Amino acid sequence: MTDVIALAAELLAIESQTGKEGKVVDFTSRWLVARGWNVTVQEVTPGRGNIWASRGRGAVTFSTHLDTVPPFVPPTLAGDRLSGRGACDAKGIAAAMLAAADRLVADGEERVDLLFVVGEEKGSDGARAANHLPATSKFLVNGEPTESKLASGCKGSQRVMVRIRGREAHSAYPHLGQSAIEPMLDLLRQLRPIAWPKDPVLGETTYNVGVLHGGTEANVIPGFAESEVMFRLVGDVAPVRALIEQWAAGRAELEWGSHIPAQRFHLIDGFETAPMAYTSDIPLLTRWGTPLLFGPGSIHVAHTTEEFVSTTELRAAVDAYVRIARALLA
């Protein structure tokens, strides 16, 4: 049977930042072909693509992403910790899904498909493309680090670009210009006291001012400022957009970015459950069946240089994915 720790370490050793997933896609597809899977690589952009592996008409699909955020962190194994970029988000999960599918096939169960996508960390172009594949599954088991709990739901997201235009002037004569940066800073501070929507399961709407830039030189009054803000949604996006428009009215231009709705997921008896504050590819994979979300590892260490997954939890995740698949197939 598959050694999930060794397989995860092999995946972690392949650098695969978003947009550069070609090598890990090649490794994974070859691994599957060698074990008798029917593998389709769906090109998303030249040199990178999604992997769809099947042994017939899959009723349950295990799916996660193969891309990672930068920078690359090579794998290390120390005690119970497998560390490295993608350890929990989400190459360790991919390894657990591969090992679980391998075990199910060995037991004679061939109604499970595998879908590994690219681009999840930046725009989800892989998931958008994968939703055009002729899927047959009734259930989609998506993998993200949930601390080995079944997610009861996930927050959605809304990106918005905020722009303010001023008038440039020599900084020695500020009265001749109009700064765009100072009113931007004032405006962003006014996000804090707004009463954003709440949900009894998913909690509070939150926001992050993730990008902020403007101006050209320290001796030039800045004529332009721009900020990108991401909101984590707990319900309908319309009330949040209305509050943002009211907040910016007459003071800034708004450009709406990507929107992913908040989600509620299918649950199975016998698993601990919890809501998740992050988004996933699930809303973009509507053709792949009723969604569930489960994975080993914690989102709290994902995207950090200390990213790791417990080897004990990783091995247990293989058993958990097998249990989930059998419960859904039953």
Image (cartoon, grey):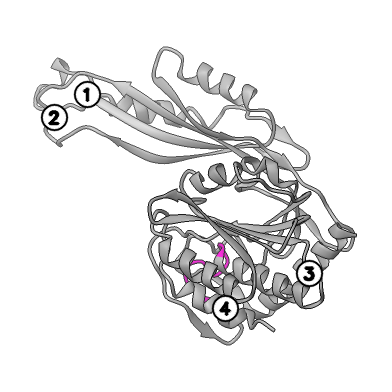
Check disc 1 and report the residue beneath it: 223
Q: Earlier in the sequence, mark 3 or mark 4?
A: 4
Q: Nearer the viewer, residue 301 or 151?
A: 151
- Find residue 36 and report its horizontal and vertical position in percent: 64, 73
Q: Residue furthest bottom?
A: 79
Residue at (74% x, 62% y) in the render:
112
User: Is residue 89 shown to the viewer in this render?
Assistant: yes
What residue do we see at 50% from left, 29% from top?
A: 191
Q: Determine whether the residue tagged by mark 4 lies in a helix, strand or loop.
A: helix
Question: Circle 1 sits in a helix, a strand or a loop, which is it?
Answer: loop
Amino acid on which disc 1 is placed: Gly
Inter-mark Cα distance, 2 to 4 = 55 Å
Mark 1 and mark 4 in contact (Cβ < 8 Å)?
no
**Residues at circles 1 and 2 in contact by the CB criterion of under 8 Å:** yes
Query: Does residue 172 appear left or right of residue 203 in this picture?
Result: left
Cα distance, mark 3 to mark 4? Answer: 17 Å
Quick one: quadrant of the C terminus?
A: bottom right
Q: Along the polypeptide, which appears first: circle 2 or circle 3?
A: 2
Residue drawn where x is 75% and y is 46% of the image:
289
Q: Tell me the number on the disc at residue 322.
A: 3
User: Mark 3 or mark 1: which is in front?
Assistant: 3
Q: Nearer the viewer, residue 302 or 269?
A: 269
For marks 3 and 1, give the CA distance. Answer: 58 Å
Q: Earlier in the sequence, mark 4 or mark 1?
A: 4
The amino acid on which the numbered mark 2 sits, given as a three-letter code, is Val
Which residue in the protein does label 4 denote? 7
| The magenta segment | 83-90
**Residue at disc 2, secondary structure:** loop
On screen, residue 137 above or below 162: below
